[in-house]
C-alpha cells in the first residue's frame, strides 16, 4: 500500500512526548512489511535545514479565507531506514521556539498552523506524484485530513482510506468555528455529529466521525474513552463510532531503548550481568548528588509534569515517601507549580531526592538504566512508553492500573509466573504510597522474587512489527468499503 503518514512531531527531529516516538518508529516497521510509506511533519525552527535536502520549487497551499500560502519543502529519511520524511517549511507558522506553545501558553493560531500542515501534505503528494491508498493522521493536529480527502481534495485523491490514531483524547484542538472557511469543507460539516462542539470547531471530534477507521494506542484505553471518566466529553460520540474503533498497543524501538547497546549509559548490561546495572545505579546516584549505595532502593520518574501523569498524587505522597528508606530521582518539565514544588522538596531532602527540571534524552536513558523501579502513577494513560522501556532495562514499573499501563503491567504475585511490576487502582496518594512501600519491601526482603521479576521483564518484547501488522489490518478495514 502507499501510505501517507502525517504527524506534528517525529523522533529524532522534534519531540515533546510519545507521539514522536511512535511517528519515528511505526513507519519504519510498516516499510519493513513492504509498504511504500512517506512521513510529513513541519520544519520547526530547531530542525536544521542545512542537514536536509531541499526540494526544488515552492508548495502552494490553498488556505481558503487566508488565501494561498507558499511553503518550502525539505526531505530526509528516518534514521536507519529508507523511509522518506518531508518537512513543510513556513516561517510564519513553524519558525518559533515551541511546537505548540511557549511559556505554558498555546499559540493562538494553532488551528491555522495545523490546517496548514494537513493541507500541505495533500499538496505535497500532488507535487511529488505520490498517490496514497491510505492516509494515516495522528491526534487533533491532522484530524481534518479524513474530511479534506473526501471534500476539498477528493478530485485528486479519489477513494483513499483514512485512519485516525488518537494518542491522547485530552487534546482536541477546539478553536473558533471560522476555521471552517480556512478548511474549505463547507458549513454543512459544522454540526454536532461532526465538527461542532458547543459552537466551537473540534477537529478531533470531526476526525472521529469522518475517518474510515479510528485507532487508539491500547485496548484498555479504547474501552476507557467510551466512558465519562476518560472521554473528555466525547464518550458518546466515540461510542457511536465504536464499530470502527481499534486498540493497538504501541511498540518500542529497541535500537534506541536497549541496555545491551545503549551508548547513553555508563555501562551496558543484560539480564545475566545485573551487577553492571548496579554501576549505572551508582552513576545515577552520583549525578543527582545522592548517597552512593546500591542497597538503597532507587525509584525513577521521567515525564511531562502534567495532571495526566499523576503529578498531584506524587506531590501529596512525597513527604511520606521521603521518610521511607529509599531514593527518588525525577526528570521532567511542565506545570510550573510542580517544577517549583518538586525542586523545593529536592532542596529540603537532598539526601534522598533529586530532580532535573528540563528535557534530556541522555538523562532519560540513565534513569531507565540506573533505577530499581520506575514510577508512573498516571490518572489516564493511552499507552505509556516509559513503563515499557523500563521493563527492557529491568527497572520494575510501579503504575496505576489505567490504559496502556494496565495492559502492559501485571501486578507482583509471588506465585504468578507472569508478573512484571507493581500496580495500584485508586487514584489516591495513599494508594501510591502503600504500593511504593510494598515494592521496596519486596526489593529488600524478597530479593529472589524481585530479581526473578527483573529478568522476566527484560525478556519481554513489544516489537513494532507486531503492532504494524495490526495497523495493516486496520488499513485493509479502512479500504474495504471502497472494494465492495
Ligand atoms: P506522553 O506521550 O504522554 O508524554 P509517553 O510515555 O508515551 O507519554 O512518552 C513520553 C516520551 O517522552 C518518552 O519517550 C519519555 O522518555 C520522553 N520524555 C518525557 N519527558 C522527558 C524529559 N523531560 N526528558 C527526556 N525525555 C522525556
Ligand atoms: C500520548 C499518550 C501516551 C502514548 C503516546 C504515544 O502522548 O499520552 O500514553 O504512549 O501518546 O502513543
Image (cartoon, grey):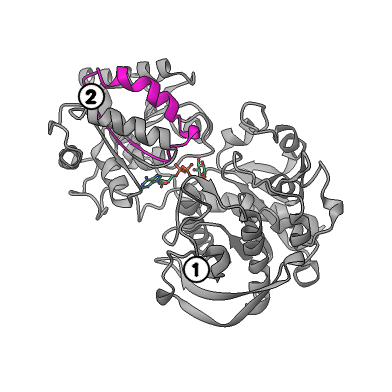
Q: Vertically, is 459 above or below 132?
A: above
329 drawn magenta: yes
Say which element carries label 1: loop
Crowdedness of circle 1 by 10 Å Cα count: few (<14), some, many (20+)?
many
Residue in the picture at 71% in, 46% down: 202
Residue, disc 2: 326
Q: Residue furthest bottom?
A: 56
> Is residue 291 toward the left or the right of residue 440 in the image?
left
Quarter of the image for residue 222 reads top right
Question: Where, quadrant-wise, is the C terminus in this rendering?
Answer: bottom right
> Is residue 201 toward the left or the right of residue 429 in the image?
right
Say which of 67 and 158 sits in front: 67
The location of residue 85, given as percent across then percent down, is 51, 68
Q: Residue furthest left?
A: 292
The location of residue 240, given as percent across then percent down, is 77, 36
Stretch in magenta: 301-330
Residue, disc 1: 83
Question: Where, quadrant-wise, is the N terminus in this rendering?
Answer: bottom right
Query: Are the residues at dot 2 and dot 1 in contact (C-beta closer than 8 Å)?
Result: no
Amino acid at each position: 500500500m502507499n501510505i501517507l503518514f502525517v504527524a506534528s512531531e517525529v523522533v529524532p527531529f522534534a519531540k515533546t512526548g510519545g507521539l514522536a516516538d511512535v511517528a519515528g518508529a511505526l513507519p519504519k516497521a510498516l516499510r519493513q512489511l513492504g509498504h511504500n510509506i512517506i512521513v510529513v511533519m513541519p520544519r520547526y525552527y530547531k530542525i536544521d535545514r542545512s542537514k536536509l535536502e531541499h526540494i526544488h520549487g515552492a508548495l502552494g497551499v490553498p488556505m481558503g479565507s487566508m488565501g494561498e500560502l507558499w511553503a518550502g519543502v525539505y526531505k530526509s529519511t528516518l534514521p536507519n531506514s529508507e523511509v522518506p520524511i518531508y518537512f513543510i517549511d513556513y516561517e510564519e507558522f513553524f519558525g518559533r521556539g515551541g511546537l505548540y506553545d511557549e511559556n505554558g501558553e498555546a499559540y493562538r493560531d494553532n488551528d491555522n498552523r495545523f490546517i496548514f500542515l494537513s493541507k500541505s501534505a495533500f499538496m505535497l503528494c500532488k507535487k511529488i506524484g505520490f498517490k496514497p491508498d491510505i492516509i494515516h493522521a495522528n491526534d487533533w493536529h491532522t484530524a481534518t485530513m479524513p474530511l479534506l480527502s473526501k471534500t476539498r481534495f477528493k478530485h485528486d485523491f479519489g477513494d483513499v482510506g483514512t485512519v485516525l490514531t488518537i494518542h491522547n483524547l485530552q487534546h482536541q484542538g477546539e478553536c473558533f468555528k471560522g476555521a471552517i472557511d480556512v478548511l474549505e469543507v463547507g458549513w454543512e460539516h459544522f454540526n454536532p455529529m461532526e465538527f461542532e462542539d458547543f459552537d466551537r470547531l473540534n477537529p478531533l471530534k470531526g476526525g472521529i466521525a469522518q475517518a474510515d477507521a479510528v485507532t487508539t494506542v491500547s485496548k484498555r484505553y479504547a474501552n476507557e474513552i467510551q466512558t465519562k471518566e476518560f472521554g473528555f466529553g466525547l464518550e458518546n460520540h466515540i461510542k457511536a463510532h465504536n464499530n470502527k474503533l481499534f486498540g493497538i498497543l504501541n511498540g518500542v524501538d529497541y535500537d534506541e531503548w536497549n541496555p545491551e547497546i545503549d551508548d547513553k549509559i555508563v555501562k551496558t548490561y543484560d539480564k545475566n550481568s545485573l551487577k553492571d546495572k548496579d554501576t549505572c545505579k551508582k552513576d545515577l546516584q552520583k549525578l543527582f548528588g545522592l548517597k552512593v549505595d546500591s542497597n538503597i532502593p532507587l525509584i525513577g520518574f521521567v515525564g511531562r509534569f502534567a495532571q495526566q501523569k499523576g503529578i498531584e498524587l506524587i506531590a501529596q505522597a512525597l513527604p511520606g515517601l521521603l521518610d521511607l528508606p529509599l531514593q527518588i530521582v525525577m526528570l521532567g518539565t511542565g506545570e510550573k507549580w510542580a517544577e517549583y514544588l518538586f525542586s523545593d522538596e529536592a532542596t529540603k531532602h537532598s539526601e534522598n531526592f533529586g530532580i532535573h527540571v528540563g528535557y534530556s534524552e541522555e538523562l532519560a536513558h540513565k534513569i531507565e538504566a540506573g533505577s530499581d523501579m520506575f514510577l508512573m502513577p498516571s490518572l489516564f494513560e493511552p499507552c505509556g512508553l516509559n513503563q515499557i522501556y523500563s521493563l527492557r532495562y529491568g527497572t520494575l514499573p510501579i503504575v496505576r492500573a489505567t490504559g496502556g499501563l494496565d495492559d502492559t503491567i501485571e501486578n507482583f504475585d509471588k506465585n504468578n509466573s507472569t508478573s512484571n511490576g507493581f500496580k495500584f487502582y485508586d487514584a489516591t496518594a495513599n494508594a501510591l504510597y502503600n504500593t511504593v512501600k510494598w515494592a521496596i519491601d519486596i526489593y529488600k526482603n524478597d530479593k529472589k522474587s524481585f530479581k526473578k521479576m527483573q529478568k522476566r521483564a527484560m525478556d519481554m518484547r513489544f516489537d513494532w512489527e507486531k503492532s504494524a501488522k495490526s495497523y495493516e489490518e486496520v488499513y485493509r478495514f479502512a479500504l474495504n468499503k471502497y472494494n465492495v
